[in-house]
Image: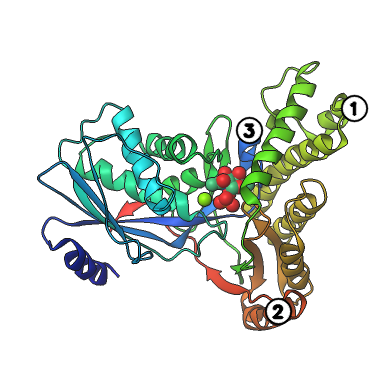
Amino acid sequence: MKKQLLEEFTNIFKKAEGVRAFFAPGRVNLIGEHTDYNGGHVFPCALTFGTYALISKRNDRKVQFYSTNFPDIGVISLSLDDTLTLNKEHDWANYPKGVINEFFKKGIKLEQGFDMLFYGNIPNGAGLSSSASVELATAVALQAIYETDFSRVELVKMSQRAENEFVGVSCGIMDQFAIGMGQENQAILLNCQTLDYQYSPVVLQDASLVIANTNKRRALADSKYNERRSECERALKELQTEVSIESLGDLTPEQFEGYRHLIPNETDQKRAKHAVYENARTILAVEKLNNGDIAGFGQLMCDSHASLRDDYEVTGFELDTLVEEAVNQEGVIGSRMTGAGFGGCTVSIVKNEHIEKFIEDVGKNYRDKTGLTAEFYVANVGDGAKEI
Ligand code: NG1
Ligand code: MG
């Protein structure tokens, strides 16, 4: 991979010396959905596919970006003397630009510019965090060539701010954290309020993680995502009139049942219920995994999906069909949507001896019911962003 990309780098930028290479993974969230911005827990892990970034410093003030995924867009150039602007047409480059902006905001001078080439093999817009992967690839690369010494968690926060403030997507911290802090064969239980975290080995005995992409475009995802955030914020405000909490993640399900009458709007109540129960489910699920109770973990994945379908209402026909077809198969321990929802991917735990048949049968039944072709990936849990 690296050798091929080096050749490509030389072709595009007419230069071969002093090139350094970095990799930032995509991520899949195993449980804890729509809890990050509610101050709850998430349980994601880094994948082995992701974004490769090759970078080399220049002698002038120019910055040039190129993505092999978007050859038609070509080289995108800017000068470090100009104000960085969001470009609607070259939208992939807004992510690295947002990260440069964060380095500026930290007072880093960036005297010389650089040439940078990207290649990503994460399915686009599938809820596996291709954008956060580009951000972290950029952040670790800039840290290396400008010899800054931000902590990993700081780079994670800078990448999130790049997305929040520069790109304008108000995502939670989960994606950047998983990608910046991931470790091979480990998932991360992250408290999104305190950023306390602990690693848990993903030991599934004789089973594996299988990701299935609905190939349904997440057209409504952004607006609905923001709508869910507002609904939860409203519910929190109602609760705060009588209960002293900072976020929905502070409540146990039992406490929530005692207070839910404080939320007059029924829809907001359902959204808050999901956030509270999902948070509790996530903590319990990790306990089960740590104790080797894969079946218990899988059951909670299924419960998570039901809550996202019925209370949070972020699934839709395609995701529900994939999950229903999955749990009807032999050897399936658990299955749920992952990421924001409305399309994108599901993640299932499938016994190794049944994976082949799983892919064939679920793929066929899904096509029959939706007219869409799903893609399947047997996922490996990989490292966080690093130099390669
Ligand atoms: P995806 O599916 O990667 O867009 C989104 C948010 C996360 C989190 C999940 C839901 C973005 C970039 N990320 O993930 O922070 O809130 O939804 O759990 O919007
Ligand atoms: Mg994204």
- Counting residues from the start of the chain, the first of labels 1 and 3 encountered is 3
Residue 329 drawn at (x, y percent): 75, 76
Badge 2 density bin: few <14, some 14–19, many ≥20, Cα 10 Å: some
- Work out whether mark 2 precedes mark 1 in sequence or the reverse, and give the earlier one: 1
Residue 3, percent from left and from top: 23, 70
Q: Mark 3: which secondary structure?
A: loop
Q: Which mark is residue 168?
A: none
Helix, strand or loop under label 2: helix
Q: Nearer the viewer, mark 2 or mark 1?
A: 2
Q: Residue 170: percent from the left, percent from the top? A: 55, 38
Say what amino acid the circle numbered 2 marks.
Arg
Left or right for 265, reference 335: right
Q: Is residue 265 left or right of residue 187?
A: right
Q: CA distance from mark 2 to mark 1?
A: 43 Å
Q: Report which quarter residue 107 is drawn in.
A: top left
Find disc 2 in the rendering and name its residue.
367
Q: Residues within 10 Å of mark 1 (few under 14, many from 20)?
A: few
Q: Nearer the viewer, residue 9 or 149?
A: 9
Amino acid type indicated by mark 1: His
Q: Earlier in the sequence, mark 3 or mark 2?
A: 3
Instruction: Give the mark count.
Output: 3
Q: Is residue 236 above or below residue 191?
A: above
Q: Which residue is mark 1?
A: 261
Location of the C terminus by quadrant is: bottom left
In the rendered image, which quarter is residue 157 located in? top left
The residue depicted at 78 percent of the width and 54 percent of the height is 309
Q: Which residue is mark 3?
A: 39
Residue 90 vertical position relative to residue 214 in the rendered view, above or below = above
C-alpha separation, residue under disc 1 versus residue under disc 3? 21 Å
Residue 384 visible in the displayed image: no
Quarter occupied by the N terminus: bottom left
Say which of 91 and 240 sits in front. Answer: 91
